[in-house]
Amino acid sequence: MIGGRILHGGDYNPEQWLEYPEILEEDIQLMKKAQVNCVTLGIFSWAMLEPKEGVYDFQWLEEIVDRLGREGIQVILATPSGAMPHWLTEKYPEVMQVQEDGTKNLPGKRQNFCYTSPVMRQKIQSLDRALSQKFGKKENVVLWHISNELGGNFGDSTCHCEQCQRAFREWLKKRYQTLDNLNKAWWGRFWSHVYTDWDQIHSPAPQGEYTMTGLKLDWRRFATEQMSDFVAGEIQAVRTASDLPVTTNFMYFFKGLDYHRLRDELDVISWDNYPFWHKRKDEVTVAMRTAASHSLMRSMKKKPFLLMESTPSMVSWREVNPSKLPGMHMLSSMQALAHGSDSVLYFQWRKSRGSFEKFHGAVVGHKNGSNTRTFREVTQVGERLMGLTDLLDGTVNQPKVAMIFDWENWWALEDVSGPRTDMNYVDSIFLYYQPFWEAGIDVDLVGMDDSLEGYQLVLAPFNYMYKEGYAGKVRDYVRGGGVYVTTYFSGLVDETDLCFLGHHPLEDVLGVVQEEIDAPCEEFPNTFSYQGVQYPAGGLREVIHAKEGTQVLSVYEEDYVKGMPVLTKNAYGEGSAYYLAAEPELNFLRRFTEDLLEELALANPLGVKLPHGVTVSLRIREDQCQSFVFVMNFNNEPAKVEGIGSWTDAETGEICQGMLELGPFQCRIFES
């Protein structure tokens, strides 16, 4: 745990209130009342920290940091590169991004910086070094927060300026060495798009080259590398006079940057979580997707992560912005802990008086101080976290099930022209994740470059691209006793988006031969049966042939593919591999998942079937001697879990035996 605590607090922007000393004093008193033990400072403070070029003003920040320290409140100190001051963009316009169509951005917004710009790097790193020297040894400063929501919220996450074009060409030279290699990797002879000079290469643009998938894939890789290098530069700068750990706040399943690459620069993974609670009365879909996001962040390093931002009430940027119903703030906070978070932090502590986010939820509003439902519920969370710190210290989830989620596969898959134009990789991940969430089984989300060691079951839905070495890794995993499940439209291309020739790279492991993929229209339905129940075959249907020795578990029941395999199982070495040839629906995956879990003798910690809207998650101490079971009810009504045996409430010591009754939006934590 950072600073030895479960962190509770969030983004604090005292620079907005320097003319209101009474408000700054009130903030300190209210933080203590709400059991806040950590705040993040400086995220968008560049204009206040460096009001003129080379002129630093740290006095206001030092006074705040020291005052917080005297009150026992720790500080996460941010570097302010997320938003540039006007003096910088006026004097050095080359620091601003250029859009893919060539339009140069005007000053303003956030994340509007060119990550390649030498000027931008020099200016922010100079400020970072000064911050390090001033605050790097402060006792209550516990973590560096690099920039903010990299690549984030406003439009394209990449810069297409001439600086970036030159850097892209140099990156390509290192990757491919020769133009001949590049042309082969990008299949440049198609449409006569052969490059004969490196300077002919330009980033993908709507008015230029936008159809060469290898180019688009490498551009995304380059953007991630440039941003990672930018972050590495900031990290090196803050470590001038400090050895504190570093983080940056990720965002959900964010397509713009490969977080599996960015994680290599960081000591701690953190992310910003803003689920759309109460969009529907049934919260299951939102709860499941949020759980998957937490799982993704935990899986980055297989260590506890930080919930860096969340709202204690509402957001301000959707078409409608409901407040959290009573109990949901506590439950959503506990959900983060259940999946491995060591913090509950908010955006924001106090509502801004003006500008874009003045109506975004906060612990303290424009009126009424602590006399609000939001403040009282935040205080309840803070009090509960105090009691959980010692219990959860040294624990993290240790799933036996993994799912392949890979950014490069995402980029390549959704850029395919055919068989459909509406293929959604993340939605497919959620579809396969949901039955495990409903069953109370923790799942890691790992990339193709990650180890599969220690998992009993690995699922790889929609695994269109196979990176170099991935097929061999899977082959070794199954041969050694693992169970591998993959689907239609998998194993079709290599990492430069060139189709494999001859056969599937894992044909021997899967025991099937792919022939073609069909995307039929709605008036051409098909079905398949599994365990005596009929299910629809969805909008993608692959024609495959089972090799000798492969079990056929289900077949198409209609049309010209009648009798051909839909679901197969092949023994390979000590393990086995399943192949699903047709797009499934959730009810089939529920039954199939149930059978997989039974085959592997995997069950949730309670060992029972969970009612709708109730799930569990398990944090285990590193020495395996103790674990904590979070039982969460995402229904706004009571729920009962029957047949659970005998359990001890980790917080109250109460013994719960036989049946567990949960109130609306309640979370109980049991020790085992």
Image: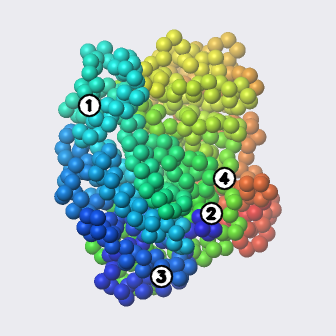
The residue labelled by disc 2 is: 1
**In which quadrant will I find the N terminus?**
bottom right
> Residue 634 location in percent, x, y?
57, 60
Q: Earlier in the sequence, mark 2 or mark 1?
A: 2
Give percent across and percent down for residue 91.
19, 57
Which mark, residue 67?
3
Give the color scheme: rainbow, by chain, secondary structure or one colour.
rainbow
Of the numbered discs 3 and 2, the one sitting upstream in the chain is 2
- The residue under label 4 is 397
In terms of secondary structure, where does tag 1 sit? Answer: loop
Q: Amino acid at mark 1?
A: His
> Residue shown at 40%/65% (left/top)?
130
- Three-letter code, disc 3: Arg
**As shown in the figure, which amino acid type bears the numbered disc 4?**
Asn
Which quarter of the picture shows residue 59? bottom left
Q: Are marks 4 and 2 in contact (CB under 8 Å)?
A: no
Q: Which residue is mark 1?
A: 202
* Mark toward the viewer: 4 or 2: 2
Regarding residue 423, the answer to whether it shows in the image is no
Q: Position of residue 37 (x, y in %)?
A: 55, 74
- In this view, the residue farthest toward the bottom is 22
Q: Tell me, yes or no, if residue 89 can be seen here.
A: yes
Would you call the spot at circle 4 few (<14 residues within 10 Å), some (14-19), or many (20 or more)? many
Looking at the image, tell me whether mark 3 or mark 4 is earlier in sequence order.
3
Identity of the residue drawn at 21% across and 54% down: 92
